[in-house]
Image (cartoon, rainbow, N blue to C red):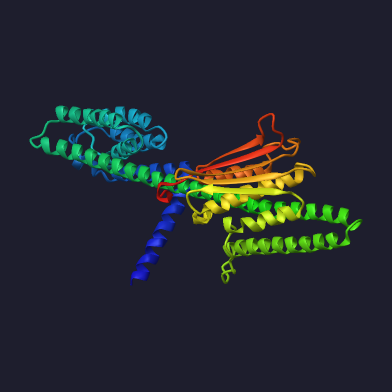
Amino acid sequence: MSGNNRSLTQLINSAAQRIDAYDKARPLVWNLFLAGCLLIGGTGELSGGGWRAISPNPGAPLWPAVVCAVGFPLTLLRRRTHPVESLLALFPLALLQGWSGVGLQVTVFCELIVIFNIALRLPMRQLALSAMLLSVPLVVGLARFPADGWVIPLQSALTSIAAVALLGIAWRTRQEYTASLRERAKQLEIERDQQAQLAAAAERTRIAREMHDILGHNLSVITGLADGGSYAARKNPQRATEALDAIATTSRQALTELRRLLGILQNETRATAPAELAPQPGLGELDQLIGGVRAAGLPVQVTVTGDLELEAEPQGRQLTIYRVIQEALTNTLKHAGPDAMATVALSRTPEAITAEITDTGRPGPRKPGGRGITGMRERSALYAGTLEVGPRPEPDEGWRVHLHLPNDEDDRV
């Protein structure tokens, strides 16, 4: 039973939507249809002669009745686009009806339809003025053809106008509420699309940052090892073999990290079995990172100071520090020159943790603004940190990367 009711409701709503769409596309058709029906009704009243029985003046001439029966429906043709003009066109006909004492049912319907459209489309002030204007012909008719029960007809007419006006206001409120819901749904859809685009952009940025850190560093190490192996092959074959072994080890590490990253991305984009995940590198893997850089030919000195073990830091902060050190040393490998040396200084206090990476190579042509430096800044911003990148102050030569991560209150001891 409930299923049938729902089907009937859906059928009615669908039919109403089709009628509304047809009316909006061809408003003149409905206007002519309504005016034609009322015109036929008025003509029927005149031909039957029953209008004299309900008229205040049964002996009224025929011509005012004919003018009202034809004129009232014609005033409705512009009621939706120009309701005030329809009211002004209807007003002299209403005065003629009241002055002559003619009574037609069709004219009452026309007046109420105009009042409904004014209530539906115009402000309350104009609605009140319109109701007062239509009450004038009623008063004129009662003054010219007084009757013992004149109060009841006047009260009935004013009550009908008030009821139709309230109906128009209620319909208008419903339309405005429906329009606001549609606008809100549209805005929510736009915001949803924008959030999806922002999330996709953030995800692309994260992927690009991880790919850059993984591939950029390992390829730089492999390049340094290959250059060193090529030089050693001419003088020390054993050193060349060690360089090739180191290249193979670094390549395997890069492939392992790349497969892990791709496995995570595949798991995020497809509803399949969970990929086998490995933890992101942290400060515990810093020795391995430094060892790879040293094997590539860059001497690195590491100093660690602080009141707590660095590995007690949260994993996300460890990853940020690790990636900043990795990117700084990668840039040193690529740009500092063959005789450069690097220093990594880590320090933790109750207020902050800092990492400073310096080298003794030539400062040019390293320029801030590349993908790597942008990634370091993005990682630092995740933890409200600051990153300073640039040449070392004179008279020192080389490059300096300084990371400052303030500690959260929950992390302080």
Give the quadrant of residue 180: top left
- Residue 229 in percent (x, y) is at 84, 56
Give the quadrant of residue 72: top left
Horizontal relation, residue 149 to residue 69: left or right: left
Residue at the image position 9 percent from the left and 37 percent from the top: 149
Q: Nearer the viewer, residue 219 or 31?
A: 219
- Residue 275 in percent (x, y) is at 59, 68
Asked if 372 appears above or below 255 in the picture, the reply is: above
Horizontal relation, residue 381 to residue 79: left or right: right
Residue at the image position 44 percent from the left and 47 percent from the top: 408
Q: Nearer the viewer, residue 37 or 250?
A: 250
- Residue 117 in percent (x, y) is at 34, 38
Name the outermost residue toward the left.
Answer: 148
Horizontal relation, residue 103 to residue 286: left or right: left
Name the outermost residue toward the right.
Answer: 234
Q: Nearer the viewer, residue 177 or 199?
A: 199
- Residue 14 in percent (x, y) is at 44, 57
Residue at the image position 39 percent from the left and 41 percent from the top: 35
Visible in this render: residue 40? no
Residue at the image position 41 percent from the left and 61 percent from the top: 10
The N terminus: image quadrant: bottom left
Q: How many marks?
A: 0
Visible in this render: residue 161? yes
Give the quadrant of residue 266: bottom right
